[in-house]
Amino acid sequence: MKFSAVSQSLSRWAGSPRTFYAALALILAWSLSGPYFHYNDTWQLIINTSTTIITFLMVFLIQNTQNRDNDILHIKIDELLRVTKDAQNAVLSLDGLDRKELEKLRQEYRSIGQAGTVHLNSHCGTDADDAGPIKTDLNQA
């Protein structure tokens, strides 16, 4: 299984109300066990180590998910800018693409944008219909 798919699944799981309530229950159980362990150093070390490890790993999962979502959002906006009337249906379902496929598609839009800049500079206007269709089969590129 790819890292992006695992991180997406774990991010959804970690952000669910059920996971929040489970974490809350664990913290409550830990705090209630304090008198039994006489609030000793080991008792404190358990919560400190657990939360540090979980936080450290979650930073990477959240960042991966945000990077991917950001790429998807930019590609969709690029498509809407390219064609104001009919956005391509292929762009509406980018969630199934991996990081390399998203980057390939992003590069295509950068090329379209650079061509549009040249067109804009030389003619003081652009026509979205002149841009032509983009490739929807990413394996051909």
Image: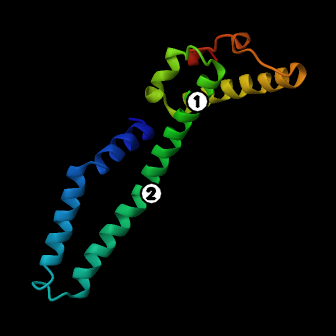
Place of residue 107 in the rendered image (x, y in percent of width and height, measured from the top left) = 67, 28
Front one among 66 and 43: 66
Place of residue 141 in the rendered image (x, y in percent of width and height, measured from the top left) = 64, 18
Measure the alpha-carbon separation of dots 2 and 1: 27 Å
Quadrant housing residue 140? top right
Quadrant of the image containing the N terminus: top left
Seen in the picture, residue 65 relative to 42 is either above or below; the reply is: above
Please name the residue that numbered disc 1 is placed on: 77
- 20 vs 4, left or right, is left
| Badge 1: residue crowd in 10 Å (few <14, some 14–19, many ≥20) | some
Query: Tag 1: residue type?
Result: Ile
Front one among 93 and 85: 85
Q: Residue at x 31, y 50 (%)?
A: 15
Q: Secondary structure at mark 2?
A: helix
Please name the residue that numbered disc 2 is placed on: 59
Asked whether the beta carbons under mark 2 and mark 1 sit within 8 Å of each other, the answer is no
Q: Secondary structure at mark 1?
A: helix
The extreme left residue here reads: 36
Query: Tag 2: residue type?
Result: Val
Which marked residue is nearer to the observer: mark 2 or mark 1?
1
